[in-house]
Amino acid sequence: MMEMSLYRKRLKLVRGHGVYVWDDENRRYLDAIAGVGVAVLGHAHPELARALCEQAQKLLVAGPMFHHEEKFAALKELHRFVDFEYAFFGNSGTEAVEAALKFARFYTKRKEIIAMSNAFHGRTFGALSATWKKKYREDYEPLVPGFRHIPFNDVEAAKESVSKNTAAVIVEPIQGESGIIPATREFLRTLRDVTEDKGALLILDEIQSSLRTGKFLASEHYGVKGDIITLGKGLANGVPIGVTLANFDVPHGKHGSTFGGNPLASRAMAETLKILRREGLIEKAGEKRIEVRGEKVIETRGMGLMLGILIREPAGKYVEALQTRGLLVNTAGSRVIRLLPPLIISKEQMMCIKQLLEEVLND
Ligand SMILES: Cc1ncc(COP(=O)(O)O)c(C=O)c1O
């Protein structure tokens, strides 16, 4: 009953088309949050929809013990964007992180995992142990032993952090949930250097930051390569998926998933990546950034179509005001309005968003 009454207060979405969604009273919204960064091709993309219908009539499940061509196609598309030796397919971002943490301990035979202040990596126990904020953690303790946090963007702390007991350092190149906070170049490069020096691994959590900054991985802007990379969100445009890439092999059976990498999700990922590549949407995202200005605005953070507008007041009431004006965004951290729009959005539509944001913030 409780769940139901909470749910009723929220906007109820019934359909989508391109960058727009409609609610149950047929009101149209420009969706600049896209399922929290998921609908990179927008909603109801006809080519993807056709491929998924066809796949549903062909093969939905194969099981982890068999190969199928959709997974090969997905891997082939992924290889066009990023180098890797091994890929594990799961069903969500948090599962991609769990796999990354397990692979790091397996490969190094070490136990310690170092994560960052303000990090968000997901809500299952391993990912939660790497997540920073008390509000996500406190009701579920004890969490997994062996995790420790250092201050994000503190180069000195990074230099001191890694020891011969450290399996991995996990970091988001641009922190998403805590308010679109990019790592500094020096910090990320220091983490790369110290992990390499000490025989530890660098896990780059690109679940939120991949696809939308103008390059496939946000870490490419830094010239930093991870040993393990986690992906999710928009990789299959809404079909649940999480992928963990490693620059080493993990023997079959060391980790697994019933649904991970099933033909439907694999097909969705292959098609999504194919369309993104053909249309040059990842590169174009880099040119669509907006800078929001005004009295209440401290700064616009982030790159391309991964943006956070830090304001001087709590952001919640502005998110609601924008919704009544037909624009969907959300908060990331208490004073940040977050934009993760579909990559098919036009520059003109981004300019309309800027105008509306400035209007509402100046009201
Ligand atoms: C950087 C990062 N890692 C992990 C996750 C968890 O992904 P999921 O919600 O798909 O489990 C998120 C989700 O917001 C994220 O932003």
Image (tube, grey):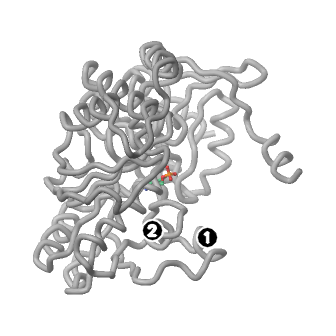
Q: Is mark 1 within 8 Å of ligand 1?
A: no
Q: Which mark is residue 118?
A: 2
Could you tell me which residue is drawn at 47 percent across and 37 percent down?
38
Percent position of residue 115, x then y: 37, 73
Could you tell me which residue is drawn at 66 percent across and 29 percent down?
325
Q: Describe residue 70's horizontal placement relative to residue 84 as left or right.
A: right
Could you tell me which residue is drawn at 36 percent across and 76 percent down?
151
Residue 232 makes an appearance in the image: no
Could you tell me which residue is drawn at 36 percent across and 40 percent down?
66
Relative depth, front residue between 318 and 1 = 1
**Quadrant position of residue 266:** top left
Count of labels in the image = 2
Image quarter where the C terminus lies is top right
Earlier residue among tags 2 and 1:
2
The answer for how far apart the CA atoms under marks 2 and 1 are is 11 Å
Secondary structure state at the residue bearing disc 2: loop
